[in-house]
Image: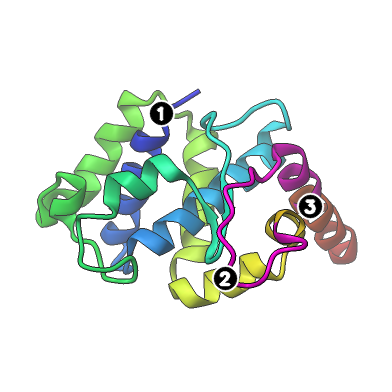
Amino acid sequence: MRDIKDIARYLGISLLSKGLSVSPLKLQKILYYTQSWYMVFFGRNNTLFKCQPEAWVNGPVYPVIFKEYKNKVDGMCDHLHASDFDCDEDKLADEAKKLAMQMNLSKEEMECIDSVVTLYGSKSQNQLIFMTHSEQPWAEQREGLSPFDYSNRDISFDTMYNYYKARYDKNHKEAE
């Protein structure tokens, strides 16, 4: 199991190395989708990191990552830069490879993470917020709350796994 801060840094650097924007808010959603799809492909009992997301107003949030990046930019929607991930702009790809090696990510794990970055990374933070709001794991934990009510309810790993596994199974069954 990896440290969520290392995974967040890896994701941020990976997004930037592909020429994609990343804000603290977008990073939260990419982390969430990475964890969700990781469990789908490697099994429910295999999580990439141990932190569970909380059902905040703008979607799933990992408080430790919120604290890590909240002061790097003026607002949660502002773009982060290579320096915010302790990296030089011209060394993003090399740093991503170095981090992957340090975290001992297998080829299959890197492919899974890269697929998430490719699939979700080109979306705006607002698109990602709307997506998470329309999906069961976040919505289930926001039940009974008004749209702007504070909540630190954990989003269940079981619900994340079951929801995305069902989507995966449905899509692959339709493709046959």
Report the magenta stretch's main SS: loop
Do the residues under discs 3 and 2 have CB atoms within 8 angstroms?
no
Query: How many numbered marks are there?
Result: 3
Indicate which disc residue 95 carries. Answer: none
Q: Give the quadrant of residue 119.
A: bottom right
Residue drawn where x is 63% and y is 70% of the image: 131
Q: Could you tell me how far apart the alpha carbons at marks 1 and 2 are, in whole angstroms?
A: 30 Å
Indicate which disc residue 3 carries. Answer: 1
Towards the viewer: 93 or 6: 6
Instruction: Locate residue 53 relative to residue 39 in the image: left or right.
Output: left
Do the residues under discs 1 and 2 have CB atoms within 8 angstroms?
no
Q: Which of marks 1 and 2 is nearer the N terminus?
A: 1
Q: Residues within 10 Å of mark 2 (few under 14, many from 20)?
A: few
Q: What residue type is labelled 2?
A: Phe
Where are the magenta residues, as a range? 142-163
Q: Which of marks 3 and 2 is nearer the N terminus?
A: 2
Q: Name the residue under label 2.
A: 148
Image spot of residue 128 (x, y percent)? 54, 69
